[in-house]
Image: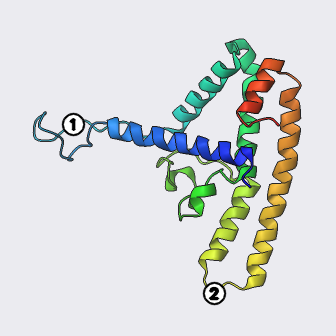
Amino acid sequence: MLTRKTILAAVAVSIVGLLLVGQSLSQPPQRGQRQGTEGTQGQRPAGRQFDPEQMRQMMERRIQEQLGATDQEWKVLGPRVMKVSEINRQVSGFGRGGMFGMFGGGRRGTQGDRPGGRPGAPERELTEVEKAMDKLRTTLENTSAKPEDIKKDLTDLRKAKEKAKQQLAAAQKELRAIVTVRQEAQLVMMGMLD
């Protein structure tokens, strides 16, 4: 049976996907692409590119609004909420390459060479869970991989996820200590707290 966190994470991923599709459909055609009957010779300035930092800021602002936190309160709450959110994605498998990695997306490397990344975007250090997922994915792509190699990489991934679960519990405890009862209830509804 799917847990509530898994369902909420899947819904969140779906919503982000729909937002991205909607954004791309509402953008004007890129230079050299055909457009409708308006305009001259199908030429327009290039549309906006997906900006992960802008998306993160929008998500933070939305969470801040849902929690009813002032800007001053958010300076304390924000980093803890986002830490819980990031670790939660790792634990649930919806971090970089999580669910989409099952279907061939979420490739290894820096942000600039994976879906959603931007060429030239600043690199960030991969988490232990992401490294273990990438290693297991590489092993699984090798059709002649030995079962013991797969088993070792799978065990390493499980250990990394278990460590992330412990980090999540600690981060949730820190967050729970500074929120109001109403904010705690909102965070439980969002799947960030138990």
Q: Is residue 117 above or below residue 19?
A: below
Q: Which amino acid is tagged 1?
A: Arg
In front: 119, or 40?
40
Q: Is residue 154 above or below residue 39?
A: below
Label 2 Cα neighbours within 10 Å, binned few <14 / some 14-19 / many ≥20: few
- Name the secondary structure under disc 2: loop
Task: From the viewer's perspective, tell me whether residue 45 is left or right of residue 11.
Answer: left
Residue shown at the point (21%, 47%) measured from the top left: 33
Label placed on residue 144: 2
Q: Quadrant of residue 151?
A: bottom right
Residue shown at the point (57%, 57%) measured from the top left: 100
Asked whether residue 60 is in view, the answer is yes
Image quadrant where one finds the N terminus = bottom right
In front: 104, or 123?
104
Q: Earlier in the sequence, mark 2 or mark 1?
A: 1
**Residue 24 percent coordinates (x, y):** 37, 41
Residue shown at the point (52%, 55%) measured from the top left: 114
Residue on which disc 1 sits: 44
Image quadrant where one finds the C terminus = top right
Q: Nearer the viewer, mark 2 or mark 1?
A: 2
**Residue 107 percent coordinates (x, y):** 56, 61
Q: Quadrant of residue 173?
A: top right
Q: Which amino acid is tagged 2?
A: Ser
Residue shown at the point (63%, 72%) measured from the top left: 138
**Residue 118 percent coordinates (x, y):** 48, 47
Label 1 Cα neighbours within 10 Å, binned few <14 / some 14-19 / many ≥20: some
Task: From the viewer's perspective, tell me whether residue 14 is left or right of residue 91.
Answer: left
